[in-house]
Each structure stands twice: as C-alpha cells, then as structure tokens.
Image (cartoon, rainbow, N blue to C red):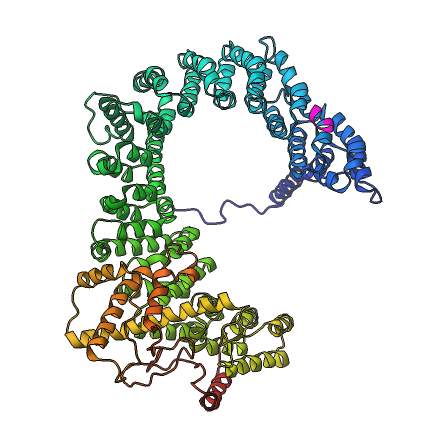
C-alpha cells in the first residue's frame, strides 16, 4: 500500500474555497459573545462617579446606588475612612453599611467582618464608641445562615470581647446567651454560644462564672446534637483555667468523664484532648484513680475498635506521658513505652514481612493515617527521651529513633529532622550515639528533610564534636571521615535542584565549619567549592551566601600560603574578571571582607583592587562601587593611611570629572556628600569610635595570632622533626584552660633580644602552641550568623597574655599593625613572596612614613592607570 501524496485529498475548486470562507465566518460568530460581554455605554455611565465628590460623599453614593462590587469596595475601604474622618464616617457611612449588609452577599459580608476587625485593632475610635456603633452590627450577623460568614463574624466578636468592659459584656453578650443557648434555638446559635461561653469564662469573677456561666455549660455538654457537645467540650479547658482548681474538680471533671464515654467518637476525642490539657490542674489521686483508667481505655480502643483516636493519641502522647510520669508504676511505665514504640512502627510490619497476626494489608487511606501517626510520634520523640531518661536512650529508644530516621515516608523523616537538635541537647554526653543518623539524614534523598535538618546544623555539629565523653580532638578525628563527604554531598544535591533557598541556607550554615573541622579540611573540601559557586551559579542570593562563607573560611584559615592563594584568586578572577558579573561579586566580597576582617587587612589586600573598578567600562559596576565607597573610607586610619585617602579622593575626583552615565553621576554626587560628612578614624582610640576601634583591634589581634601560631608550629616541626600527637596538645590545652589566661608574670620580650633566656623562650613557644591547638575550636562564637562578635573571653585574655604586662612585647598592637620585626628570625605579619596588591600602614616615625609614602605612591598610580577591564 502506497502513501497518498501530500495534497492528494485537498480540493482547491471554487466550491471548496467558499466552504473554507464559511468556516471562517463561523469562527467570527463564536467570538461575538466575547465582544458582547464588554460593558455597554449605559453600564459605563452607571458605574461612573463624579470626580468632584469627596471620599465620604463618594462612599455614601456608591452604597446607595452603586453595584455590589462598588459597595464591597467601600466596605473594604472603611478602615481608611475611619482614620481620615471618623466622625463623618460614623454619622453618614456606617448607617448605609448597616442597611446594605442586610441584603449583602457572602463576599461583602466577609469583607465587612474583616474591616470591622481592622478598625478595632487600629483603635481608630474609642472602645466605647466602637461598642456603641459596631457591636450591634456584629451581633446581628454572627448567626448568619452561611457557615463561613458566621465564623468570620464570630472571630471578629471574639476579638472584640477582649477589649470590651465587663458591664458591656454582661449586658450585651452574657445576658442574651441565656436564651440563645436553649435547646429550642438553632444548631448554629448553640454552637456560637459554646464558643462565647469559653471566651467569657476569663472575663468574670469565679462566683459570676459559677452562678451564670456553669449552668449553661452543663446544659450544652448534655445537648442532643453531638456537634454541640463536642464544641462545648473543647471549651472546658479555657473554662477550667478561669474558675480554678476546686470548681474544676467538682464541676468540670465529672462532665469530662461523662463525655469521654459518649457514643460519638468526635465527642470522646474532644474529651480526651481536654483531659490531657488539664492534667496539671489535677492532683496525683485524681490522675491515678480517675484519668489513668480513662487513658488506658483510650489506648486499648484505639487499636481494637476506633482507629480515629490514633491520630490524636499519637499527637498528645508525649504530653500525656509527661503529665502521668510521677504516678506510673514500673509496669505501667513500660506499657506506655511499648505502646509508643508500637505506634512508631505502625503500618511498617506488613512491609517488612512481620505480619504475625495475619492482619490484612492496609488500604491507601489507612496507610496515610498510619504515616500521620508515625509523624506525630516523631514530633513527640524528645518528650519520650525525658520519659525514659536520657541515660536509658540506647537501651530503650535508639532502635525506635533509627526506624524514624529511616522511615519510608518523607513527612516522618522531615519531622524527626526538625527534632534532631532537641534530641542532641537531651542526650548531652551520649550524643555520639546518634551520629550515624545525622549522616543518614544529611544524605537523605528528600531536600525537605535536608532543609529541616540544616536549620540547626551548626548547633548540632557543635554538640556532636564537643558534647561526647571523649575529648574534642578525638571526637573531631572520629567524626570527620563520614561527616565531610555527607556535607559536600548535601550541598551538591541542593545545588543540583531548583530549590535555591535550601542551597542558600546550606551555604550560610556551613560558615560554622571552622569551629567543627580543621583548616586544611575546609581548604581542600569546601573553600574552593565556595569559589566555584560564586563563579558558576546563576542565583544571586546563593552567590552572596557562598561569598560570605568563603570570607569566613578565609578569616580562620591557619596557613598564610593558602590565604594568599585565595586572595589572589579573588582579585584576579573576580576583581579583574572578564565578565562584569564577576566584578560585581568581587564588590560583594569586599563588603563582607570589611565586615568580617580588620581594617588593616582590607587596606592591605583589597583597597586598591576595589578602587581600580572606578575605571570599569560597565556602569553597573561603577555604580555599585560608588555605594561601597563610604564603607571603604571607613577602613582608613589617619595619619597612617593618608596616602590611601589621597588615592580614594583622586578616584572620586576622576569619577566626578569623567563620568558620562547620568545615573552613575547622580550617585557619585550623593556619595561625595556622604564622604564629606564622614569623620575619619584616628590611630589612637577616640571616644566616638571606641567600640568600633576596640572590635577592630580584636579582629586584628586574631589575625596576627594566626600568623604567630603558624610560625611557631613551623619552628616546632623543625626542632622536633615530627609534631607530637594531637592528644598531648589537647591535654595541655585543657590544663591551661583551667586558669583562663596565661600567667602575667611570664617574661615577654622582643624576639632575638638577649634579655630572654633559652628556657624562658621555650616556655613562651610552648604556651603559644597550646593556644594554637585550641584557637580553631574557640575562635568562632556559637552564634555563627554574627561573626563580628566572635571575640570571646578566652581569645581576649589570650591576646593580653601575648603582649605581656610591663614587658617589651613581641608585637605592638597600639602602633602599626603591620610593622616589620627587628629580628631577622621572625616574619613580618602578612608578608608574602607572592605578588599581591598591597598597602602598608605608617612606619615607626614620621620620616619613615613620608619616605614610604613617596615610594609606594607611584607604582600604585601606575597600576590604576594601566588597569583595563573588559565587559
């Protein structure tokens, strides 16, 4: 069989062409109703309002003769009218609203309820005027035939009750309730009465509640409709707290016991939940003789006859066990624990092939219910740890925790991931028991689970590395092999998904890693990954998160060679990158550097590379730099950085004279005004900058201490050939930690001076090495989000001990932070053989300062002039 030619069945005769035209005419006929649906001139005329009318007159006109949509708009705008002109609104607009609401539809009713509530919350009128003008309208519509409308008005009324005086409540609300709660009233009226009684119970004295409210409560608890009994039962919790313990035991408890045996499951469920919430109000006798038997019957019925109770029982089981903790015998304690374990694996026995009782496999609805039960059990897991005592966790609950962490349903694993930090805190020294489960959740295939776990990841990792029974260093060595691959895999899995917020959160939380693992591990496994994300990721918040975390890694990197390498990559690949996008990210990085590092560090490495972008060919880059210039200027200290200030002024002057983009020029002019108003920081401490200068000095000391530690470690390796094990140094660190600071009587002197004996020099080096072993574990504050405040007590006292008291110090912190040492045996801070753009602080006297300023000025200017950047 041969296929027909392409045009074999097409007929181009005259008749066929007329047929096609008719088809096209039919299509136009189909579109005509769409055109007819547009507003006619008459309708437009009817919807048009005179523009000369003021707001009040327009509202009255629209409510009187406008359409429903216009009336709804006026009602929605009622809070604005009350703010603008409350007297006229109450006199002219509100009566019209009252008239319209009698015949209004659902949309206007809901809008009116919301507007009335907004007026109450904004306090546009006094509560007396509000109750006089608005309360009657609310009470008229609270029993509306539409359930949604009735609930909306009821919510507004319940909020109004909080503010009304007692006399108004009694006359306007409580007294009418006597008739509205009668059996002869509608179901909706009795349901509203239940909720109002619960709200009023906290507004009156106990004797009024006993005389006027409790009889109505008893009547509604015995109503013929189960919806009313259930609704009233849920209000007994609030009523009990309002009437006190004695009346609760004599009046509320008997009603609860009767409702707990009700024929309706929803009523029994409401009674059970209310009993759990009221456990603290009953003494031990009531709990053991009355409540405990009821709870046992609930647990038995939940599996045998009424599975609907399982969800509520599993949700409140932790609170229930906590409330019954003191009255349970060992056998009862074990039964509750076994019941909880059974709920944690509900629905999983059939999947694992352990269907010993020949129970038929659950259907889809039952599977969802069982998964919800296991989710509730995961939510209650921290409470159950307290119930069994954390010391018994491994014997009693570890297997259950393992099952919850490996549950086949994502919501269960998501809930246990949320609780993971609480579990870690409760286990304290036994936290190492759940380390494998942390790794499993980090490697979970669901990003929802990972997102929940990451929320408290820094605190959890800190507990795992410091809360165990073994020492910090031993824990680190044990944890690292599995932890680092899990962390890198989690980040890469988030990076490969479309959930960039989860990826951003992970990168932000990884800023805690300098407190958890070693500097080398961060450098080789995480730092370069952050740089790659900055270069390749397309989501700006993710790039910024990676940039900040990279700066924190750089802040606590302990090897100068690695620090210089990453600084050079930032300058060459971002600051001098071919894409303007890279150069924008470089300016973001500069902002983080200013925030996290000392002023000296920024001025030495990033000041000039940032200023070079004033010649950038892309306007957006120059614009972003202009916004950053005030922060750049804030890093300068006078007179040490006078030459850098001149460079800054030169760049700003060039921008003012040569800038052609009008938007950039406008920002430059505003920036110049801001720069002129800025006060310069001096080398010496000033009162107005005291806190900022002190914080900057602490940052600078930490940076110098990192250099000292690196040099001392190198010297020790050269002297001993091979360093001792980390355990010995950790032991020394713990011994030194007991005194908080090193003894101030240790003689400190300039390196290489003859006043220091060899034995004393060795002691000094040993003390600094001890600090070097503990710096990475103490440098980062537990609150990782605010790293400017990382300088804790330990680090501050450590620096004080380095400089010495009344002795010549190894490093002078009050003078130039980057001064070269006199001894040839010690390195200069931040010295490097690599060719990095750098600036230096003032030298020891004014002559050196002048000479060095003239030497450095020309090559820097040449660098600025020769700078070329491609968009």
Vertically, is 564 above or below 456? Answer: below
Nearer the observer, 690 or 16 = 690
User: In what quadrant of the picture does the N terminus appear?
Assistant: top left
- Indicate whether residue 633 is drawn in magenta: no
Q: Judge whether 161 appears above or below 822 on screen.
A: above
- Judge whether residue 133 is colored magenta: yes
Q: How many labels does the image show?
A: 0
**Picture residue at 42% right of the left edge, 55% below the top:** 504
Q: Is the magenta stretch mostly helix, strand or loop?
A: helix
54 and 23: which is toward the camera: 54
The one of 759 and 195 positioned closer to us in this rendering:
759
Q: Answer yes or no: is residue 733 visible.
A: yes
> Where residue 516 appears, x then y in whole percent?
30, 57
Residue 687 horizontal/vertical position (percent): 54, 69
Q: What stretch is highlighted in magenta?
A: 132-136
Taking 817 as reference, is 444 left or right?
left
Identify the image quadrant of residue 649: bottom right
In this view of the protein, can residue 65 be seen by the observer?
no
Task: Looking at this view, name the residue that lies furthest to the left.
Answer: 721
Residue 400 percent location from the top left of the image: 25, 35
Q: Nearer the viewer, residue 222 or 129?
A: 129
Q: Is residue 8 left or right of residue 527?
A: right
x and y percentages locating residue 38 in the rendered image: 72, 39
The correct choice, above or below, for 404 with respect to 769 in the image is above
């Amino acid at each position: 069989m041969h296929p027909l030619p392409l045009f074999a069945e097409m007929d181009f005769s005259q008749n066929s062409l007329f047929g096609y035209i008719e088809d096209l005419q039919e299509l136009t006929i189909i579109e005509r109703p769409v055109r007819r649906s547009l507003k006619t001139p008459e309708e437009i005329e009817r919807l048009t309002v005179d523009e000369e009318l003021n707001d009040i007159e327009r509202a009255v006109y629209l409510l009187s003769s406008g359409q429903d949509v216009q009336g709804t708009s006026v009602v929605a705008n009622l809070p604005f009218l009350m703010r603008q002109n409350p007297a006229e609104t109450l006199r002219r607009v509100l009566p019209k609203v009252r008239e319209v609401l009698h015949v209004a539809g659902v949309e206007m009713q809901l809008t009116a309820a919301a507007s009335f509530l907004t007026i109450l919350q904004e306090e546009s009128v006094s509560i007396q005027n509000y109750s006089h003008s608005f309360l009657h309208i609310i009470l008229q519509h609270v029993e509306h035939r539409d359930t949604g409308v009735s609930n909306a008005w009821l919510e507004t009324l319940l909020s109004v009750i909080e503010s009304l005086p007692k006399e108004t409540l009694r006359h306007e609300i409580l007294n009418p309730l006597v008739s509205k709660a009668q059996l002869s009233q509608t179901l909706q009226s009795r349901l509203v009465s239940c909720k109002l009684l619960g709200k009023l119970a906290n507004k009156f004295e106990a004797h009024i509640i006993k005389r006027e409210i409790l009889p109505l409560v008893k009547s509604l608890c015995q109503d013929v409709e189960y919806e009313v009994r259930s609704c009233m039962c849920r209000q007994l919790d609030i009523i009990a707290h309002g009437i006190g313990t004695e009346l609760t035991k004599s009046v509320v408890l008997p009603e609860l016991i009767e409702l707990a045996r009700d024929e309706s499951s929803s009523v029994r469920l409401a009674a059970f939940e209310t009993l759990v919430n009221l456990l603290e109000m009953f003494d031990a006798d009531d709990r053991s003789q009355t409540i405990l038997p009821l709870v046992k019957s609930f647990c038995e019925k939940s599996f045998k006859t009424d599975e609907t109770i399982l969800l509520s029982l599993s949700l409140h089981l932790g609170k229930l066990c906590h409330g019954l903790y003191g009255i349970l015998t060992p056998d009862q304690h074990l039964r509750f624990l076994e019941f909880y374990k059974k709920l944690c694996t509900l629905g999983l026995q059939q999947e694992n092939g352990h269907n010993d009782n020949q129970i038929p496999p659950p259907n889809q609805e039952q599977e969802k219910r069982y998964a919800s039960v296991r989710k509730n059990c995961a939510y209650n897991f921290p409470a159950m740890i307290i119930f069994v005592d954390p010391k018994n966790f491994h014997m009693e609950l570890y297997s259950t925790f393992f099952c919850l962490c490996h549950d086949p349903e994502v919501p269960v694993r998501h809930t246990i991931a949320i609780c993971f930090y609480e579990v870690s805190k409760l286990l304290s020294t036994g936290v190492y028991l759940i380390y494998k489960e942390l790794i499993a959740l980090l490697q979970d295939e669901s990003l929802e689970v990972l997102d929940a776990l990451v929320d408290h990841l820094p605190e959890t990792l800190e507990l795992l590395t410091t809360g165990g029974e073994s020492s910090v260093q031993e824990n680190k060595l044990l944890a690292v092999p599995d932890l680092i691959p899990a962390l890198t895999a989690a980040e890469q899995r988030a990076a490969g998904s479309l959930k960039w917020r989860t990826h951003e959160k992970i990168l932000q939380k990884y800023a805690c890693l300098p407190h958890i693992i070693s500097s080398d591990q961060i450098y080789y496994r995480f730092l370069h990954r952050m740089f790659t994300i900055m270069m390749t990721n397309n989501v700006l918040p993710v790039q910024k998160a990676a940039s900040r975390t990279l700066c924190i890694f750089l802040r606590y990197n302990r090897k100068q060679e690695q620090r210089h390498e990453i600084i050079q990559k930032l300058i060459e690949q971002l600051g001098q990158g071919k894409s303007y996008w890279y150069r924008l990210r470089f300016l973001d990085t500069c902002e983080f550097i200013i925030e996290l590092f000392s002023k000296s560090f920024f001025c030495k490495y990033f000041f000039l590379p940032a200023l070079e972008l004033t010649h950038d060919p892309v306007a957006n880059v120059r614009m972003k730099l202009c916004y950053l210039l005030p922060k750049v200027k804030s890093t300068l200290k006078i007179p040490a950085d006078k030459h850098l200030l001149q460079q800054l002024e030169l760049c700003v002057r060039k921008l003012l004279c040569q800038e052609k983009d009008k938007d950039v020029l406008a920002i430059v002019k505003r920036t110049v005004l801001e720069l002129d108003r800025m006060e310069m920081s001096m080398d010496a401490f000033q009162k107005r900058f005291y806190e900022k200068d002190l914080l900057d000095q602490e940052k600078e000391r930490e940076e110098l201490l990192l250099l000292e530690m690196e040099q001392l470690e190198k010297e020790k390796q050269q002297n001993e050939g091979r360093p001792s094990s980390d355990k010995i140094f950790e032991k020394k660190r713990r011994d030194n930690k007991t005194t908080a600071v090193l003894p101030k009587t240790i003689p400190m002197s300039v390196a290489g001076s003859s006043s220091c004996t060899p034995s004393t020099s060795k002691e000094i080096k040993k003390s600094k090495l001890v600090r070097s072993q503990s710096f990475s574990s103490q440098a980062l504050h537990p609150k990782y989000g605010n790293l400017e405040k990382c300088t804790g007590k330990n680090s501050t006292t450590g620096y004080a001990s380095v400089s010495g008291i009344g002795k010549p110090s190894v490093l002078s912190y009050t003078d130039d932070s980057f001064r070269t040492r006199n001894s040839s045996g010690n390195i200069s801070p931040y010295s490097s053989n690599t060719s990095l753009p750098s600036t230096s602080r003032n030298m020891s006297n004014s002559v050196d300062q002048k000479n060095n300023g003239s030497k450095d000025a020309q090559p820097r200017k040449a660098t600025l002039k020769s700078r070329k950047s491609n968009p």
